[in-house]
Amino acid sequence: MSDDLRELPLRERKKLRTRRALAETALRLFTERGYDATTLDDLCDAVEVSKRTFFRNYRSKEDVALAADSDLWSAYLDRVAAAKPDGPLLEALRVALNATLEDMDPDWERRFLATRELSESVPVLQSHSLGYCQDTTRAMVETLAGRSGADVDDTCLRLTVEIFVASWRTACLRWTAQGGQGGRDGLTDLIERTFALIPDALTRAA
């Protein structure tokens, strides 16, 4: 049993195991059979849970397909909310991302890479992923604004978060295109190199 499970009450451990089983089985079925060809009934039968149990864990078929994404960003938002960073905000956000990636479960990057590849081939997942990205960006702005006392419409704050998200997406897309080369360390390295290019990007000649 992993350390993160040992620290939880029995009921929470069971709930987390069910959630993980749904996500891992969904990814396998969607990859093997195709997203559209796999129904929620198929998934629930494979995990041996009811649809009621499914909807206690995920809101939709799209949500369970993108579980590796939500696992990362839920953990990231929790870390940002709890942190008391100093110095440049953009750098603090990058450091928090690297720390969150380091703390993800050992199998996370395999699931994340498979999720990204699946999403690229299924239009409805592309749309859902973009919507989730917007929701996460909004939540990040609200969290940072609440912590600093800034207005959620603060242009500088929003611009900083948008630059952070764009940099992440740039590194992530490149890592995915390379087939996840280097694993999690490879992704972290691409993130750091992408963020290092921001000053040059902002002053690049037309």
Image (tube, rainbow, N blue to C red):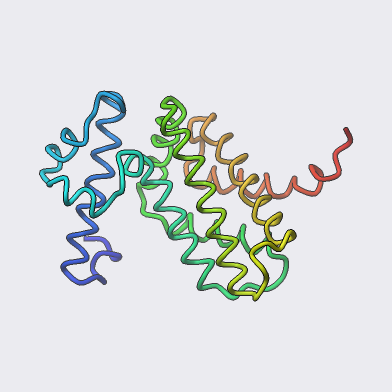
* Image: 157 above or below 126: below
Q: Position of residue 135 (x, y in %)?
A: 50, 51
| Residue 138 relative to residue 107: left or right | right
Picture coordinates of residue 76 (x, y %)?
Answer: 49, 60
Residue 14 in picture, x, y percent from top left: 17, 60
Residue drawn 26% across and 72% down? Answer: 7
Image quarter where the N terminus lies is: bottom left
Which residue corresponds to the image point at 44% horizontal and 39% vertical from the top-left?
128
How many numbered markers are drawn? Answer: 0
Q: Which one is nearer the viewer's eye here, 205 or 156?
A: 156
45 shown above or below 33? below
Q: The C terminus is located in which quarter?
A: top right
The answer to which quarter of the image holds residue 160 is: bottom right
Q: Is residue 76 left or right of residue 19?
A: right
Residue at position x 81%, y 45% from top?
A: 202
Q: Quadrant of residue 151?
A: bottom right
> Between residues 78 and 57, which one lies in front from this camera angle?
57
Answer with left or right where residue 199 lies relative to residue 70.
right
Q: Where's residue 93, x and y in %? A: 61, 60
Between residue 192 and residue 19, name the one nearer to us.
Answer: 19
Q: Residue furthest right?
A: 205
